[in-house]
């Protein structure tokens, strides 16, 4: 990875964080919980950043429509996150495969 790629990645992440900070407080709280949960279950393709950007896009649309965050995602943040990554390979899948000795997907 070139130094220019690292710099560009940091710029993109800072812009993303600024978008999150611009959200209303309840949206920010839920976003942080989603982020924590997704980092824990670990979709393998998480580092590309498109999932988090998509969540912020979705939240910004909800704010513009005047909806509360729980109206958008429901009461169970973990279940919503699980639906987001249900077709994605996760580190939990890889762990399960290593324990069982077979490929899960």
Image (spheres, rainbow, N blue to C red):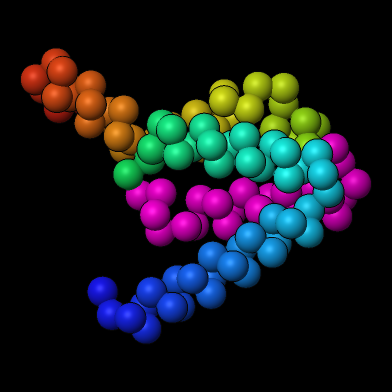
Q: Which segment did they paint magenta? A: 45-68
Residue 61 in magenta stretch: yes
Residue ID at (63%, 60%): 17
Residue ID at (66%, 42%): 31
Residue 65 in magenta stretch: yes
Residue ID at (30%, 34%): 91
- Where is residue 11? Give x, y as percent: 53, 74
Nearer the observer, 78 or 74: 78
Image quadrant containing the N terminus:
bottom left
Query: Does residue 44 lie above or below 11 as drawn?
Result: above
Q: Quadrant of residue 40?
A: top left
Image quadrant containing the C terminus:
top left
- Where is residue 57? Give x, y as percent: 67, 56
Q: Is residue 30 left or right of residue 5?
A: right
Query: Does residue 1 lie above or below 51 as drawn?
Result: below
- Where is residue 6? Give x, y as percent: 38, 74
Query: Does residue 100 lie above or below 65 as drawn?
Result: above
Q: Main secondary structure of the magenta part?
A: helix
Using the rendered image of the protein, determine whether residue 85 is visible from the camera's viewpoint: no
Q: Quadrant of residue 41?
A: top left
């Amino acid at each position: 990875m070139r130094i220019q790629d690292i710099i560009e990645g940091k710029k993109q992440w800072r812009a993303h964080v600024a978008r999150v900070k611009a959200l209303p407080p309840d949206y920010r709280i839920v976003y942080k919980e989603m982020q924590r949960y997704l980092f824990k279950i670990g979709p393998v393709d998480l580092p590309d950043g498109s999932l988090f950007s998509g969540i912020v896009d979705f939240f910004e649309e909800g704010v513009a429509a005047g909806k509360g965050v729980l109206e958008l995602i429901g009461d169970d943040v973990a279940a919503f996150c699980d639906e987001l990554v249900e077709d994605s390979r996760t580190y939990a899948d890889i762990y399960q495969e290593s324990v069982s000795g077979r490929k899960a997907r």
